[in-house]
Image (cartoon, rainbow, N blue to C red):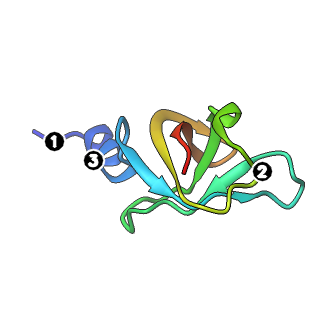
Amino acid sequence: MTSLRDLLAESLAIGETVPVKLEQTDDGEALVAAHPRESSPLDIVIVDGEELLEEWPPTEPVAVEIIGEVVDGRVAGRIVESA
């Protein structure tokens, strides 16, 4: 039996690494990205790995691991590799 939790984790790509184009929030405090899966109800906010970036915000897509937390209405992500 598939649980609601399993379906949500699958649509959010929890534990997967995905390439995304990051943008700075309007207040300049965080980096965010549209979720690459259309089925995801949440976008991505970066919570770790900013030190890997050579520029803020990066101009090229970066590899982000989706972690199982929700922060300010977005799923949390960790930068694992910059372009």
Give above or below for 14 relative to 26.
Answer: above
Would you say 12 lies left or right of 50 here?
left
The residue at which mark 1 appears reads as 2
- Badge 1 crowding class, 10 Å Cα cut-off, few under 14, some 14 to 19, many 20 or more, is few
Identify the disc placed on residue 56. Answer: 2
Upstream in the sequence, badge 1 or badge 2?
A: 1
Report helix, strand or loop for mark 1. loop
- Badge 3 crowding class, 10 Å Cα cut-off, few under 14, some 14 to 19, many 20 or more, is few
x then y, percent, for residue 81: 51, 40
Identify the disc placed on residue 7. Answer: 3
Report helix, strand or loop for mark 3. helix
Amino acid type, residue under disc 3 in the picture: Leu
Residue at the image point whose x is 66% and y is 54% from the top: 32
Kindly report the distance in space between the C-alpha atoms of the residues bearing marks 1 and 3.
7 Å
Upstream in the sequence, badge 1 or badge 3?
A: 1
x then y, percent, for residue 73: 64, 48
Residue at the image point whose x is 42% and y is 59% from the top: 40
Report helix, strand or loop for mark 2. loop
Q: Residue 67 or 41: which is nearer the viewer?
A: 67
User: Marks 1 and 3: CB-CB under 8 Å?
Assistant: yes
